[in-house]
Amino acid sequence: MIGMKKVLNSEVSRGNNPSVIDVAALNLWMNQDVEQTGRDFPAAQLLQLVLDNIPQEVFWKNRDSVYVWCNRKFALAAGVGTPDQIVGKTDYDLAWTREQADFFCQIDKRVMETNTPEYQIIEPQTQAGGKQAWLVTNKLPLHDQEGNVIGILGTAEDVTERKEADEALQRAHDQLETRVKERTAAEREQRTLAEALRDTAALLSSTLNLDEVLDRILTAIGRVVPHETANIILVEGAEARVVRFRDQVGQYAMFQNLNRRFLLEELPNLVQMAETHQPLILADTLATPKWVERPDTTWVRSYLGAPIEMEGKVIGFINLNSATPHFFDTLHAERLRVFADQAAIAIDNARLYEQAQELATLQERQRLARDLHDAVSQTLWTASLIADVLPTVWNDDQAEGQRSLEKLQRLTRGALAEMRTLLLELRPAALVEATLGNLMEQLAQAVMSRKKLDITVITDGECSLPPDVQIGIYRLAQESLNNIAKHSRATQANIHLRCQPGSVQLLIYDNGRGFDPADVALERLGLGIMRERADAIGALLKISSETGRGTRITVLWTAAETGETK
């Protein structure tokens, strides 16, 4: 190599064109013996041997990009049999395409003009024999003793195997990363499902309000099964009705008329689930006769439904809709089935609770009706006796006759009030139709007809209350007055009803003997029932009493506490 550099430099020192190298002189040098190496073969052979056994292709060119020398690996890559056949050729004479030769010459020119090495990673290039190979090339400027650029020294290496190994490693890394992400996503989905089921189960044990439970179930489904809209349908004989609807994205106006009844046979998808007791997936609603399109469902492209079963009987359905065809899969169906089972439990518990409430209401109504019936009978019997003897008393003593007449008048008015109260118990809807003030007046008249008790009723404002609140306050007043009549030994009582927008206060107090609340169990005096009634409507109930100083009952209801509106 040192000798070859001398040959190149000698051409420059003689003033010759540095791009024209005396090949004969170069060959003469490469064929001379190098005695100082201690080898038995020429230095050129030693150099060729070394360069032929390194992994890179090695070559150099003069300033005209004409090859001066190369090793065997480069000759093979260039499609030339031996290195000496490369000498004197350019890239346009080798196995490259014209585009490749242009590219190589551009690099040569840039390296020599800028006197700067260039490192290139070249995407797969066609080699001799048609092989596609990734190449890594280095081109460095060659200098003479004065520092003038006289050519290019280049190396090239086929890194295809390394590149393929790197790509295989990257693919393996990507696959591992994908599997980790998929596993993490699966674990996250399972955790979300478990949390949704736990929340729903906790709700089932904390409330028996069917509407609230169904709303929460639809919310929980939205966390684990993506969709645009969801609804719950309940079956009643051959008919069905949508009882709950949820729009996850807020742009689909479906089922605005909730509780509208329709025949189950109108929807083939529901019929199939009712017959098979299995979830149903309609991958493309446009390609199946089981989907009946309505004006508000033209956007639906895929559907998933699950039957709600109780004791082997289908009592309803949970239905999900998506605007994307082929959106739902079997995993979604299995998850929806779980929530359908929870919905079945909620519906069954709510129905049992409603039946118990209806039974309790009926029993309470019957008890009140019996009490009223007995009170009316007693009042009418007393009035009848007074009416029978009134003529005789009037003839003997007109003043006493006048008092008897007034008592008879009071009894008949009381009997009329008792009858009206009895009619209210037989037709509870009348409790909502009447004003709360009139109901208080009627209760007071009924009690005064049975007891020698003066009751004053004061009403401030007009009460406009939700039906259940009005009925609850009426029942609290009724129970309070019954306790006063039966236990207080009072001679006077007052009912003060204060009505304001969004709130009502009922105050009832008497001058009776009172009691010590610490000595009276909730079961006595109907106190437990009264607290239950107040809790049912979200009202505050306060009972204060002191022995010998009467009793004071306060009921306060506000819309803000219950979420009700006026």
Image (cartoon, rainbow, N blue to C red):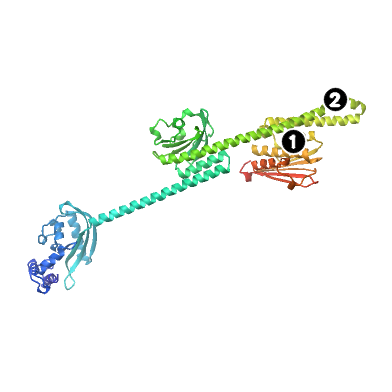
CB under 8 Å between callouts 1 and 2?
Answer: no
Label 1 CA crowd tier, 10 Å (few <14, some 14–19, many 20+) = many
Is residue 464 visible in the rendered structure shown here?
no
Disc 1 element? helix
Name the mark nearer the viewer: 1 or 2: 2
Farthest bottom residue in view: 36
Examine the image and state in which quarter residue 83 appears.
Answer: bottom left
Of 22 and 424, which appears nearest the observer? 424
Three-letter code, disc 1: Leu
* Residue pictured at 38% horizontal, 33% vertical: 287
Is residue 561 visible in the rendered structure shown here?
yes
Compared with 475, 87 (above or below) is below
Examine the image and state in which quarter residue 356 appears.
Answer: top right
Q: Which residue is mark 2?
A: 388
How many marks overall? 2
For the C terminus, the image quarter is top right
Three-letter code, disc 2: Asp
Label 2 CA crowd tier, 10 Å (few <14, some 14–19, many 20+) = few
For the N terminus, the image quarter is bottom left
Disc 2 element? helix
Examine the image and state in which quarter residue 154 appears.
Answer: bottom left
Q: Which residue is mark 1?
A: 443
* Residue pictured at 8% horizontal, 71% vertical: 33
Picture coordinates of residue 546 (x, y %)? 77, 47
Picture coordinates of residue 61 (x, y %)? 15, 64
Give left or right: position of 372 versus 42.
right
Mark linked to residue 289: none
Q: Sequence-wise, which precedes: disc 1 or disc 2?
A: 2
